Image (cartoon, rainbow, N blue to C red):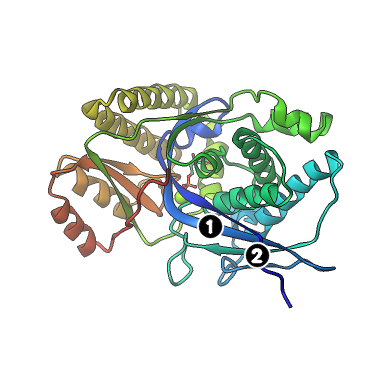
Amino acid sequence: MNRPWTTEVRAPGKLYIAGEYAVVEPGFPAVLIAVDRYVTVRVRDAVDTGRITSDLNAGSQLEWYRRDSDMVIEPDETPFSFVLAAMRIVEEVVVELGEPLQIFDLNITSELVDDAGRKFGLGSSAAVTVATVTALCAHYGLDLSRMEQLKLALLACIEVQRSGSGGDIAASMFGGWISYTSFDREWARTERANRSLVELLQMDWPGLSVHRVAPPDGLRLLVGWTGSPASTSRLVGGVQSRKAKGRMDYPQFLTESSRCVEALVKALNDGDREGTLAGIRRNRELLRQLGERTGITIETPKLRHLIESAEERGGAAKTSGAGGGDCGIVLIDDDADIDGLLATWERADIRILNLYVHQ
Ligand code: PMV
Ligand code: MG
């Protein structure tokens, strides 16, 4: 007979509001939100053999593509690799603290996919990593701060993913509206090899910061889903491989993105509605230019339609995350013609996701 689940935690999905692509460089800022769709992880003691079960695995598949002549396989596409990395990192802390290791079952359920198992682009890998880290910290009774648990989840992620700013992890760990600046992966890798994990968790990490940001005042956040999933690591890898080839002024993009995100954060915190809308529009423009100069499709025709139809009604809109599909976001006046906008989306086969911010 199975024992009852003794620990249950959930971690929210996320959406990027601004700062994409630049935030993968250490110290550069982004704004994100956590959304009220969750990955839930349950833990219970087991005897001899622990089992990991997940509804995330139904319909999962391996994808590959070429970068130059290399065949690149997406390890990020297999949710268990994040779960296993999260389990290993927490257990490393347990061992360092001299506590006994346990056998347990893990059960994972996700609301970050539609009924057919298609991902909404809400960061299921990040959420499953955060949920597993926090569930196991609770299960083992580890007394770690939220920041320390964030660092554990970031370390788990870099074991699996070649790229990624960790903004998704921070949003899932902290909830609400946040501004995030990214850690230095190389620094973390080097330090990881040179000192104990517990020591590393207690250090200040260069570049890494998380701050709460005020939600926009009098503006509604709408999220439109294009129905086509996009591979973040492929898109980021594309930009990364072109940045060195002189086809664009990458340092200038970074400077302008961070100026834009800082102005947006200030506008949000000041309750400055016009400044908030202007920040979203400016960031859209920067991302569009980045796409044009690198030849990478960030704003697909469907996303452009989503954005322009919102602009026509006074909203400010942009792609969310890496683009190329997934979601677009809109900030729009409470009393704008939102019904009209949604009708336009419906005709264009853009699905509104009824999401709220998870606090
Ligand atoms: O597409 P998403 O929601 O996974 O967001 C990716 C955001 C990037 O800045 C392009 C990459 C990253 O890891 O921050
Ligand atoms: Mg995406």
Estimate the x, y position of residue 150 in percent, counting from the top left. Answer: 61, 38
Estimate the x, y position of residue 206 in percent, counting from the top left. Answer: 63, 23
State whether residue 69 is above or below residue 18: below
Residue at 43% x, 66% y: name it. Answer: 114
Q: Residues within 10 Å of mark 1 (few under 14, many from 20)?
A: many
| Of 277 and 108, the residue lying toward us | 108
| Of 248 and 274, the residue lying toward us | 274
| Of 332 and 256, the residue lying toward us | 332
Estimate the x, y position of residue 50 in percent, counting from the top left. Answer: 77, 66
Estimate the x, y position of residue 135 in percent, counting from the top left. Answer: 64, 52
On the image, numbered disc 2 is attached to which residue? 5
Q: Secondary structure at mark 2?
A: loop
Where, quadrant-wise, is the C terminus in this rendering?
top left
On the image, numbered disc 1 is attached to which residue? 39
Residue at 43% x, 27% y: name it. Answer: 253
Q: Amino acid at mark 2?
A: Trp
Residue at 74% x, 45% y: name it. Answer: 89
Q: Amino acid at mark 1?
A: Val
Beta carbon at label 2 within 8 Å of ligand 1: no
Spatial separation of the CA atoms under disc 1 and disc 2: 16 Å
